[in-house]
Amino acid sequence: MQYLLTRIARVCSGRHFGEDVVVRSVVIDSRSFAIDSSTLFAAIRTESRDGHDFLLDAYNKGCRAFLVEHEIDCSKFEGAGFVVVEGSTEALQRLAEEYRSGFDGCMVAVTGSAGK
């Protein structure tokens, strides 16, 4: 995966502002060890947590690309870029669909809750 934030904004029907960062991976948990400057942190809002509360944590770990549901004060995030969307979960689904459409061949899914 390698997308510019401007392309992600188009795919997700969002609005880009800030830097046009190259994205190579996506995380939804700021505690992830896989965060670097090419990681997109998607701030997901749930009943119990709001991923927007963890933007600074992800930024401090090196993340410079963010998928958010509302405007962010960029002054705290030097060198970062943002895509503002209506719903982060739906935007991630559109991004995954775009990414998957580039694959040739058969796709196999393993499901279940135990023994994988």
Image: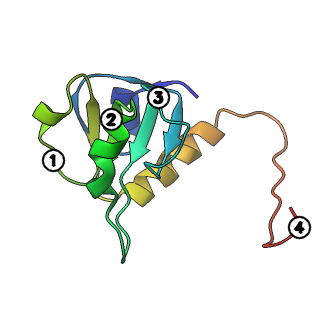
Mark closest to the chain's N terminus, 3 or 2: 3
Q: Position of residue 78 (x, y in %)?
A: 20, 25
Amino acid at dot 4? Gly
> Which residue, given by chain and number where applicable, does mark 3 sit on?
36
The secondary structure type at the circle numbered 4 is loop
State left or right for residue 28 relative to residue 99: left
The nearer-to-camera label among 4 and 2 is 2
Q: From mark 3 to mark 2, how far is it between C-alphas?
A: 10 Å
Residue pictured at 27% horizontal, 28% vertical? 80
Residue pictured at 38% horizontal, 33% vertical? 63
Q: Residues within 10 Å of mark 2 (few under 14, many from 20)?
A: few
Cβ–Cβ under 8 Å for marks 3 and 4? no
> Which residue, given by chain and number where applicable, does mark 2 sit on?
60
The nearer-to-camera label among 2 and 1 is 2
> Which residue, given by chain and number where applicable, does mark 1 sit on?
71
Mark closest to the chain's N terminus, 1 or 3: 3
> Which residue, given by chain and number where applicable, does mark 4 sit on?
115
Q: Position of residue 71 (x, y in %)?
A: 15, 47
